[in-house]
Image (tube, rainbow, N blue to C red):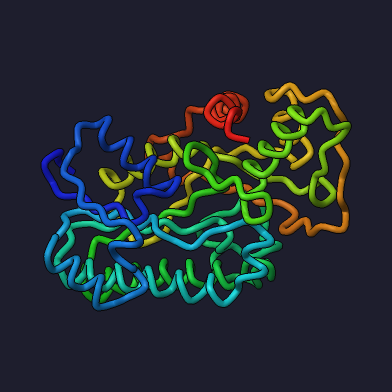
Amino acid sequence: MHTKCKIYIAGHHGMVGSAIRRRLEKAGFDNFVTRTSKELDLRNQSEVDVFFHQEKPDYVFLAAAKVGGIVANNTYRAEFIYDNLMIQNNVIQAAHQSGVQKLLFLGSSCIYPKLAKQPLREDYLLTDTLEPTNEPYAIAKIAGIKMCEAYRSQYGSNFISVMPTNLYGPNDNYHPENSHVLPALLRKFIEAKKQGLPHVEIWGTGSPRREFLHVDDLADACYFLMNNYDDSTLINIGTGTDVTIKELALLIKGVVGFEGELKMDTSRPDGTPRKLLDVSKLSGLGWSASISLEEGIQKVYEEVKDRF
């Protein structure tokens, strides 16, 4: 990649897309082509085709997706599979037709089987059944990976797929029902502290283990891979370390300075028991995460503490 090339970040207003843009700007890139979802509906094939024909971007970061936490995934199952399939089908096909030099497709670690051996290696894909609560989203993302592989195999397209672990950071979603676990907990603790509540409710048993990556680290990894990775197989992006949900809650509690108790709501689903990515492939290329979980939570807390 050179700084004068034209870059299209699909989903540039989202947490991932905005982080990728910040990382590229830091590296001296300034030739971005952007469209909001109101200006360009990525689910509409003809709109996407016209956009790519007119703009002809050199590089594409496909970060646009319909995303949500465990409840949203389980509730809006049809929308999660339809919207995500349409977005990626249209963008990948249009990128091929317009001669894009390279495309990076962002998947999700939920593509791996629910009870796969830990840590999750790239070759575990399609070896067993998925977690039922987010199966529609996972199937859409698996289709995106396979589409990139197929276009590379048939047309020689330089399309790569990356699988990030659980993300957090600037521009995250803090909706009380539809957000992921870290921002949901952060909001709960901030509100509980301000309201002087005696306890904070944690969904599930607190025993599932999760890995968390700051989105600025993800963006740095995506920039690194766009420059240094041209393989047909997907590649994991994570920290290689995990914590229990209860440990995460205690870490957030400490950062926020909440002095009440934790209360586990075991009527809520736990989801997958453990989800830790094997990042040996990425670290073998020379990249590793640099923002610790505590440091990352502190940074996010400073950004959002006055919002709730």
Q: Position of residue 137 (x, y in %)?
A: 55, 68
User: Horizontal placement of 244 versus 47: left or right?
Assistant: right
- Report the front residue among 112 and 202: 202
Q: Residue at x 11, y 41 (%)?
A: 4
Q: Is residue 182 above or below residue 28?
A: below
Which quarter of the picture shows residue 102? bottom left
Q: Is residue 242 above or below residue 74?
A: above
Q: Residue at x 59, y 53 (%)?
A: 120
- Report the front residue among 187 and 268: 187
- How many labels, in total? 0
Q: Position of residue 231 (x, y in %)?
A: 32, 57
Residue lying furthest front in this view?
195
Which quarter of the picture shows residue 185? top right
Q: Residue at x 62, y 42 (%)?
A: 183
Q: Residue at x 42, y 54 (%)?
A: 162
- Report the front residue among 53 and 216: 53
- Give the position of the N terminus as an image quadrant: top left
Q: Position of residue 77 (x, y in %)?
A: 60, 73
Q: Position of residue 106 (x, y in %)?
A: 41, 56
Determine if residue 101 is in view.
yes
- Give the position of the C terminus as an image quadrant: top right
Determine if residue 278 is in view.
no
